[in-house]
Image: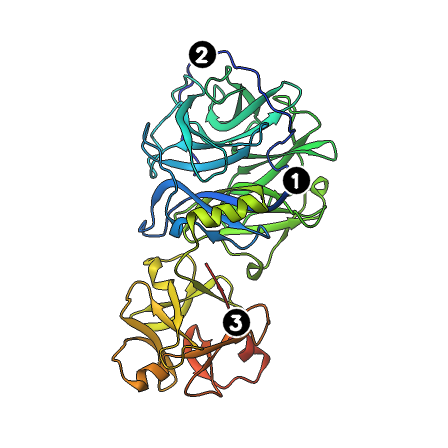
Amino acid sequence: MPRPSRRQFLGMTATVPLAATGALTLGAGTAHAADSAYVMGYFTESPDMLAANYGLHLAVSTDGLNWTPLNQNNPVVTPTAGAGGLRDPFILRKQNGTFVVLATDLKGTDWTYNSQYIHVWDSTDLRSFTGYRRLKLHDMVTHSWAPEAYWDASRGQYGVIYSSVNSSGHNVIMVNYTGDFVTASAPQVFFDPGYDVIDGDLAIGVNGVNYLYYKRNSTLVGARSTSLNPGSFTPFSTPVSHGGTEAPTLVKSLTSGSTWYLWGDTWSPNGVFYAWQSNDLAAGTWTALDQKTYTQPLNSKHLTIHPITTTEYTNLLTKWGTPTWNRLKSYNFPARYVRHADYVGRIDPYAFDPYTDSLWKLVPGLADGAGVSFQSVSHPTRYLRHYSYAVRLDENDGTPAFAGDATFYRTAGLADSAWSSFRSYNNPTRYLRHTNYVLRIDPVSTATERQDATFRVGY
């Protein structure tokens, strides 16, 4: 969430929490023994807000780096109370193996809207959502931003942390305790280093230490504690950022025991995620990942990532389906995606509007079904084709010449065989590539040309 103004502090009231049940001992950032994939939750915005949607969106991944949006990148559930929208969703597997979803009660960007509540859903499998309600956290005239939850074994309850302004006059991380996410204890200050902090995210029980990452001055910073007691966390890490960065999310690799990823979100509506890697959380230092290695879901904002089983991964894909469109990421300019602008094919930095200009249906080749043609989602009667070797978006006139110009053979990537390259059907010595960010077809021989002609087909 963006940095807020100061709010007036009022008194707090409480209700009595219930005891937690279940046998598992999970916390935020902790994987279940059977987990082999990941689910992500998010909402959507874009630079001109054409993608603004404040319902819960889901995506899945097998590596935690490249994501498949579900339900055509449409929401799977939307709040009906409070502001009628959500931001900052969070997914937690509870002690009984089912899930709870929490989210900020806020639709859009009206930062003056104050809610003492957060949205809550229950779900057995993230395919259906029941028991929708709002959980009251405090009586202050301020917000309850970016809620997250964790299991506190010492208390036998869940802690719910969130960003709010207390009597100090700046944002701190608060905590309430609950056994059922229906009622909660009185709020306490969980973390207040003496300056404005928001967007807390926990990794619990890593070699006996708990880690709390948060946003401070548009950077992501970590604190740590050997307990989960309020007030016990001490800042320690080297800040990381890429421009104005917020919404830290810690993710443990399911395939490498020591590898952790830290995701961060730019706070503007552009909604660009960046990722860092560490092989030692205790060191508090992070290395930025090459953007070739990860791809965020289209227009996604303020993510939550939680491990899931192979069965849950498969069932989510079966329930919600994969997108009917693709995006093409440039290999040597991985911040850029293939799009059309004024009917010219080019690669431009994500994110942009209209975002649908970067969505393509890879259909059987118009001249040869063994090849592919790129049908525009935003202009479905138009296809990418070459004309005098320049690539543009033209109406399909039904002629054999157009069909040939608009057909390509997909091959292993010339710069990386895990990626893809596209050889022209009717100019078979030439490949689709970019030069000065504009698409064309050219013969390819040098290392740079091979990189220019290599793309990742994803979402």
Front residue of 422 and 273: 422
Front residue of 58 and 455: 58
* Observer able to see residue 35: yes
Where residue 389 sits in the image (x, y, percent)? 39, 85
Q: Tell which circle, 3 or 2, labels the residue nearer the N-terminal end.
A: 2
Quarter of image, res 85 = top left
| Contact flag, marks 1 and 3 (Cβ < 8 Å) | no
Quarter of image, res 344 = bottom left
Question: Nearer the viewer's eye, disc 1 or disc 3?
Answer: 3
Mark 1 = which residue?
237
- Amino acid type, residue under disc 1 in the picture: Ser
Which residue occupies 60% across, 39% down? 221
Mark 2 = which residue?
13
Q: What distance separates the C-alpha of mark 1 from that of mark 3?
A: 39 Å
Give the quadrant of the N terminus: top left
Position of 405 with respect to 230 (left or right) is left
Q: Tell which circle, 2 or 1, labels the residue nearer the N-terminal end.
A: 2
* Observer able to see residue 6: no
Residue farthest to the right?
A: 207
Q: What distance separates the C-alpha of mark 3 from that of mark 2?
A: 58 Å
Q: Residues within 10 Å of mark 2 (few under 14, many from 20)?
A: few
Which residue occupies 69% across, 41% down? 281
Q: What distance separates the C-alpha of mark 2 from that of mark 1?
A: 35 Å
- Amino acid type, residue under disc 2 in the picture: Thr
Vertical placement of 292 versus 40: above or below?
Answer: below
Give the quadrant of the C terminus: bottom left
| Contact flag, marks 3 and 2 (Cβ < 8 Å) | no
Mark 3 = which residue?
420
- Amino acid type, residue under disc 3 in the picture: Ser
